[in-house]
Image (cartoon, coloured by chain):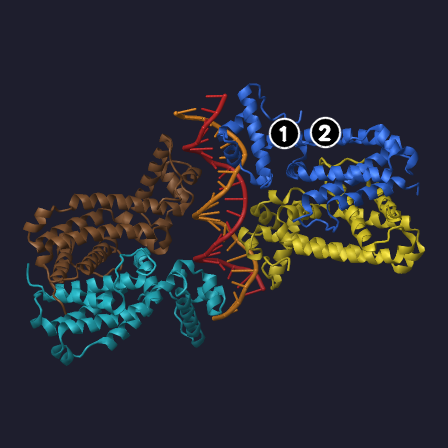
Chain colours: A cyan, B brown, C yellow, D blue, E orange, F red
Amino acid sequence: MSNSFARPATQTRSIKTQQKLMDALEALLREKDFDAISVPDLAAEAGVAVGTVYRRFENKEALIPLLFELWTTRSALQMETAAVKAEEVTSADLRQLLRTQMRAAYSFIREQAHILRAVHLQGRLRPQLIGEDWKQLWKDALAGNRAFLELVKDRIGQSDLDRAAEMMIYIANTALVEKALFNEDGPGYVVSAEGDAFADEIADIVYGYLSLGPA
Amino acid sequence: MSNSFARPATQTRSIKTQQKLMDALEALLREKDFDAISVPDLAAEAGVAVGTVYRRFENKEALIPLLFELWTTRSALQMETAAVKAEEVTSADLRQLLRTQMRAAYSFIREQAHILRAVHLQGRLRPQLIGEDWKQLWKDALAGNRAFLELVKDRIGQSDLDRAAEMMIYIANTALVEKALFNEDGPGYVVSAEGDAFADEIADIVYGYLSLGPA
Amino acid sequence: MSNSFARPATQTRSIKTQQKLMDALEALLREKDFDAISVPDLAAEAGVAVGTVYRRFENKEALIPLLFELWTTRSALQMETAAVKAEEVTSADLRQLLRTQMRAAYSFIREQAHILRAVHLQGRLRPQLIGEDWKQLWKDALAGNRAFLELVKDRIGQSDLDRAAEMMIYIANTALVEKALFNEDGPGYVVSAEGDAFADEIADIVYGYLSLGPA
Amino acid sequence: MSNSFARPATQTRSIKTQQKLMDALEALLREKDFDAISVPDLAAEAGVAVGTVYRRFENKEALIPLLFELWTTRSALQMETAAVKAEEVTSADLRQLLRTQMRAAYSFIREQAHILRAVHLQGRLRPQLIGEDWKQLWKDALAGNRAFLELVKDRIGQSDLDRAAEMMIYIANTALVEKALFNEDGPGYVVSAEGDAFADEIADIVYGYLSLGPA
DNA sequence: GATGAATGAGGATTCATTCAT
DNA sequence: TATGAATGAATCCTCATTCAT
């Protein structure tokens, strides 16, 4: 389990407390970086005592897997919502379909940027904390994408669908996330396209890749 | 200037010390994160006293712009080395050319990963420290790329070369850097392709994008 | 409020700790200057950890307003104790009355010299920390003195009682405090009179001033 | 000698350096407290190297006796300038004479406040550094004052001229110095009279004291 | 269980002083 | 002799974590 360091919260009160803490954490993450949030900060925002935090979480790091879980849950919900039905895929224009999908994904990522930023940064700083779960999330996404490619395989140039599915998610994710998380105030690689226009560009890149025949 | 907080080192001895410090920093960055390196750590590794660090650098943060400069310098050197001559561009197969370029870039990024990792993370944590210089680096890269596209414009589908140049670097950079910096032990988006094969995939993605005509 | 930087101490334990810290501070001030007392010094003397000091006080400077408050409290108590009743003032010999008062004041100042020394020095070094409260203390003292002069106005030469009250406290305070705080080992202006004899001299000076008619 | 820790400056160059340092110190004292002036600060202001300071002065403390000497010299000059001739004393109105004297003294003290402030504070913080010389200065002042009282003894009420001389300087000095050094921004005992008016008040106080007969 | 006071190791930074050049 | 780079002890302060109440 990802949250192996979170103490089990069985009682109603405990669960409430845990929820209060996660809400507080999310609120604080909109303002500042995870590392800049002290445990007293968190306790104050949640309206509980410091000791209570430690009754629920072995230590500060134990919050990170929970954050990751939050991301996973919301992410799964989004995938479900955004999933296109098989018949739609068959009938639609592929390039347009990709654009629609990418716009939805980008919009979602931007809304959840505060969570994702923490997950990203901490995931890189303390990989061991969320490594396995991240891989699982990835696998699920991959499977969904692989199924999608199966539906459109006659309309694309790539023949190795596994590899294509992998690269396609990889490229879309890195591009969208980088822009959503860091492009505004960070150094980041500056790109003038914004919002839907940016999402469309990324969709086109994916489309171009899928269209490609063997070297 | 990026290193406005580094105190000027005029004497031979100072320069030596500064070099020792930068070397020590680079060595430590291969082991741990910038934030995990304490000033005493750094001083010990460099074989100097704590105060000496502060004689050369206004504070710990002042090391970051220097790190960035290090990256800039090496990066410029790499670009120069890897640059293809106009006649080569004209004669070569575009897809192959992109692969060669991408392989070189990826290889370079992997070698310098420890520096780039610090620059990336710190650039996101303290954007004001390297913001402007990063933009300059980006501009230079963009200009080079724009010139390259000019040479091959008859062989690609994109008509807005400015936008294409931007997207192409953006996508290549985010993809290569993500993989080089975080894919090994980090959560990262897992991709099975490794090394040159991975670089080739990215090159293909760029190639596909360039080949694309209007929607 | 003068102690705006002292964190509120609500629990019994906190109050005890704060008391321990103030006691330790007072003890150390008998030995050395405020600036020579380090936070670890203070913590050790109080028998608490360094962090505990910072839980009660935002920083080292925040102790100064508390010291000032200590002085204010003791000072107020002293004024109350030493206050003469209206009927006593009317019946007593003015010169003798002033001497009695000055002796009491001088004795008190000498007993509290360690506190007053810190307040004085720090008040001059960091005026903003106690400026307003000092002025209030001064105003109170002035008011009391003004009332006293009102009772004896028929027996003195000065006609501007406000000015006279001001000068009288001023001169008495600077003289007594200088002697009490610095005369023993400091450079100070050496005066051979000691103890009550010194206080009597100052009382006489005040008496002479009050007796004076217009120029 | 007060400056026993200042290394002898025999050569022309050394003397020049020492002068540069003292000038720099005086300049810096107009801006900030002695303790807030670091040796590098001082060296920079004087335009010499840090090491050079230590060639002239055993340590930072060794500057204080020199500062004191500066004060002594200027003070002696002032006393000489302000001294009244015997015949003037005899003929003049005593109260008026005291006022004139006090105005001159106060004006001088205010001009030299930056030096005197340092001497005062440091004299209290490190008494051993200037103790003896201060006593000598005091003795001289006392002798001058005693001679003055001798000239006017028929016009005053005090019979113990030694004691009167002592108290008179003491009271005048503490009052004038306190006001000149700390009254403006410090906590200090607030007195509304300013400049000459304040000096006149102090003169009156002295006059009143001198006029006083036995208790 | 909850509370929040107390802990103390650890970090950044300063600056008087030394000493190699 | 002058220089200024180097030294390192000392200081303030933080904050994750513990534990008495």
Q: Which residue is mark 1?
A: D66
Q: Which residue is mark 2?
A: D76
Q: Could you tell me if residue C183 is visible in this image?
A: no
The single residue placed furthest to the bottom in the displayed view is A87
Q: Could you tell me if residue C64 is visible in this image?
A: yes
Q: Secondary structure at mark 1?
A: helix
Q: For the C terminus of chain C, which image quadrant?
A: top right
Judging from the image, mark 1 belongs to the subunit labelled D
Q: Are marks 2 and 1 on the same chain?
A: yes
Position of E18 relative to D125 (above/below): above
- Position in image of residue B212 (x %, y %): 12, 64
**Mark 1, other Cα within 10 Å: few <14 / some 14–19 / many ≥20:** some
Mark 2 is on which residue type? Ala
- Position in image of residue D85 (x %, y %): 82, 28
Mark 1 is on which residue type? Leu
Q: Nearer the viewer, residue F19 or B139?
A: B139
Q: For the N terminus of chain C, which image quadrant?
A: bottom right
- Position in image of residue B170 (x %, y %): 22, 58
- The disc, 2 or 1, on the residue closer to the chain's N-terminal end is 1
Q: Of the residues tagged 2 and 1, which is closer to the observer? A: 2
**Mark 2, other Cα within 10 Å: few <14 / some 14–19 / many ≥20:** some
Quadrant of res A107: bottom left
Position of D59 relative to A179 (above/below): above
* Residue lying at 90% horizontally and 42% vertically, measured from the top left: D212
Answer with left or right where residue D149 lies relative to residue D110. right
Judging from the image, mark 2 belongs to the subunit labelled D
Spatial CA distance of label 2 from label 1 is 15 Å
Dot label at residue C83:
none
